[in-house]
Amino acid sequence: MKDLSGRTAFITGGAQGIGLGIARRLAREGVNLAIVDIDAEALEQARLELETAAPEQSIRVAAYKLDVRDRQAFAQVADQVEERLGPVSLLFNNAGVASGVTVAKMTYEMWDWVLGVNLQGVVNGIQTFLPRMIKRGAAGHLVNTASGAGLAATNAGFLYTTSKYAVVGLSESLRNELQAAGTGIGVSVLCPGPVATGIVSRSMMARPGARQEANSEMLSRLKEVDNHLLQHGVSIDAVGEMVLNGINNNSAYIFTDRLAEDLVIERTKSILACLPPRSDKNADTDARSLSLLAGGAGRSGS
Ligand SMILES: NC(=O)c1ccc[n+]([C@@H]2O[C@H](COP(=O)([O-])OP(=O)(O)OC[C@H]3O[C@@H](n4cnc5c(N)ncnc54)[C@H](O)[C@@H]3O)[C@@H](O)[C@H]2O)c1
């Protein structure tokens, strides 16, 4: 999708970090912006920043406090945004949290929190907006934020990795299906490497039980991790530019660096190494099984 001017974008986690970088870049393309976030204070700052530049960019800006896990609130905010800014045709499911919890310390609360924000939040965005986009029949684009940790298991932790693999799988299959149905709606999955944001300390302070755990030693350790990200990560504005290019080229994946390369090669090699040996007898059965898995059985029976 090339000319985005006059369209409306909905960006979750738009108050700061990567979401704000995307909003800033889209503003310069003349895109009307709806930013939503759970952090009201940061949201207000972002709204003021984007609104200050809005008149010269001839765009409109709206900001809503929203917890992406709340389906009902999601639909209500979507209605209000579309009434104010027009139909949303660019959707950025970007809100996310990091979690470094170890297996020894995992709890259902932590699973629910990480999967709730990182996966269910993306599902809620898609379930809220995609049927509306399809019904209108106009072109559109979805960008789901996963991570390099969605393509290979890194040291990002198993909870985070679980959520991000799911976002990659969801995005790949949705892209194929929307393309096969000729909808004109593209899907890209953003798989960043390190980006200069405060995600680690922000997430640690927002996670279940954080207030009881917080102490000055823990806070300074978290700040250290964030400082490393801030010093070595790609800037949020550079990510905004990469995302715009991804939409313009309808890229399946948007990367911010090549850090995932070796990990993806290693992972692919270990998968291939575990496949059973090839045999002629397997070939027919394999082709039939694949078509059944892809839904061939349902279609032939109807
Ligand atoms: N920063 C990195 O190095 C990096 C790397 C790979 C992937 N990512 C992914 O990029 C996305 C954005 O991360 P970021 O680095 O900009 O972090 P960030 O903390 O700067 O921004 C994330 C935003 O999401 C918001 N948020 C958190 N929970 C929410 C909820 N329940 N409902 C609504 N909003 C909520 C936060 O308030 C915050 O404004 C995340 O999905 C993250 O997993 C980040």
Image: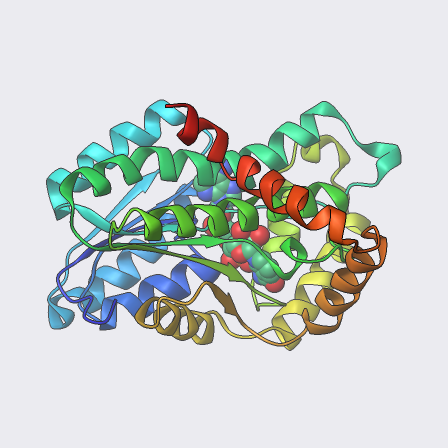
Seen from the viewer's position, the closer of residues 142 and 156 is 142
197 displayed left or right of 252: right
Q: Residue 280 at what x, y percent from top left?
A: 75, 53
Quarter of the view holding residue 30: bottom left
Quarter of the view holding residue 215: top right
149 displayed left or right of 40: right
Q: Is residue 194 visible?
A: yes
Q: Residue 3 at what x, y percent from top left?
A: 18, 70
Does 151 appear above or below 86?
A: below
Quarter of the C terminus within the rendering: top left
152 displayed left or right of 62: right
Seen from the viewer's position, the closer of residues 88 and 232 is 88
The residue that appears at 20% across and 62% down in the rendered structure is: 31
Q: Residue furthest right?
A: 104
The residue that appears at 34% across and 57% down in the rendered structure is: 46
Seen from the viewer's position, the closer of residues 255 and 137 is 137
Q: Is residue 66 visible?
A: no
The residue that appears at 26% across and 62% down in the rendered structure is: 50
| Count of numbered tags | 0
Quarter of the view holding residue 246: bottom left
Color theme of the render: rainbow
Quarter of the N terminus within the rendering: bottom left
Q: Residue 45 at what x, y percent from top left?
A: 35, 55
Q: Residue furthest front?
A: 281
Q: Residue 87 at what x, y percent from top left?
A: 16, 45
